[in-house]
Image (spheres, rainbow, N blue to C red):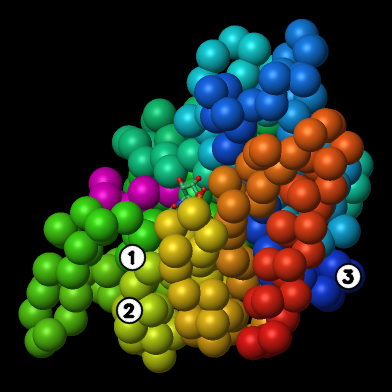
Amino acid sequence: MVFFEALDARIEAADSVVSVGLDPDPARLPSFLDAELPRWAFNRRVIDATHEHAACYKPNAAFYEDPDGWRALAETIAYAHGKDVPVLLDAKRGDIGNTARQYASALNPDGLDADAITVNPYMGRDTLEPYLSRPEKGVFVLCRTSNSGGADFQKLDVGNDKPLYQYVAERCAAWDEHDNVGLVVGATAPEELERLRDAVDRPFLVPGVGAQGGDAEAAVEYGLAGGVGLVNSSRGIIFAGEGADDESAYFRAVGDAARKLKRRLNEFR
Ligand SMILES: O=C(O)c1cc(=O)[nH]c(=O)n1[C@@H]1O[C@H](COP(=O)(O)O)[C@@H](O)[C@H]1O
């Protein structure tokens, strides 16, 4: 099945557009996790607590880039799949074709077996080709990012009052021969979200609600085209248990945070 059909089915089944970001910062993992692979132990409990409310899981590769980390990531992806939840690997890849083909092996069944990946379009079309050419896998292209520096380059006028982020969105939509391209647009830039929604008819991944304080209403209003789209929160969900007295209270709070975000986003759907 092509990626966005599978995602659509999951959104329907969970009645949720919440992407749960799995960014297990070692400095914030709870001290009661006494395990050989603490990030995996943590993620497993997060998945147990949140899977009913998750349209997808989005592990950010930065939190796994060491030998134990890759094992934790592989276990996490397999476990999420066991709960029927797709996994979007947030790796923000972008390199020459020969290298990109290796990066894209993260999508292979004998690699990490991720269902989708985030990519950086700065180096151009050939660097995206190893991802674009796989209809069964999703490709989310960075477009208007949620960070404050996102405006430094992305808002530059490329002519006729068109900002670079819009040009990127339009080019990537034009390159989308297999209906497998989505765009990353931060919830912290609601006006740009609206502008992009008018410009292109592709699904959005909208990060930046929760810890970054983005606009949940705009995320839903402009983020979802035809019901398909994702709104991500990472720290706001996975660390919601901080301050809890014990393990079960910790992960109850994590599950509650996912449920509350789902409910809040569904108010605007
Ligand atoms: O591609 C992303 O997911 C992404 C793009 C963007 O513009 N802003 C952004 O915050 N992200 C990622 O989304 C997650 C946000 O985490 P929280 O701020 O903890 O919800 C992190 O993994 C970021 O790397």
| CB-based contact (under 8 Å), mark 1 and mark 2 | yes
Q: Quadrant of residue 104?
A: top right
Residue most extreme to the bottom = 198
Residue 235 against residue 198 in the figure, above or below: above
Q: Quick one: label 3 or label 1, which is nearer the N terminus?
A: 3
x then y, percent, for residue 243: 67, 38
SS of the residue under disc 2: helix
Residue sitting nearer the eye, 165 or 58: 58
Q: Residue at x 79, y 13 (%)?
A: 35
Give the residues in magenta.
119-124
SS of the residue under disc 3: helix
| Residue indicated by mark 3 | 13
The yes-or-no answer for disc 3 within 8 Å of ligand 1 is no
* Amino acid type indicated by mark 3: Ala
Q: Quick one: label 1 or label 2, which is nearer the N terminus?
A: 1
The yes-or-no answer for disc 1 within 8 Å of ligand 1 is yes
Is 213 left, or right, of 40 in this rendering? left
x then y, percent, for residue 255: 80, 52
x then y, percent, for residue 110: 74, 27
x then y, percent, for residue 135: 64, 58
| CB-based contact (under 8 Å), mark 3 and mark 1 | no
Per the model, the C-alpha gap separating discs 1 and 2 is 8 Å
Per the model, the C-alpha gap separating discs 3 and 1 is 29 Å
Is 82 left, or right, of 237 in this rendering? right
- Quadrant of the drawing holding the N terminus: bottom right
Q: Residue at x 12, y 68 (%)?
A: 156
Per the model, the C-alpha gap separating discs 2 and 3 is 30 Å
Residue 46 against residue 214 in the figure, above or below: above
**Residue 131 can be seen in this image:** no
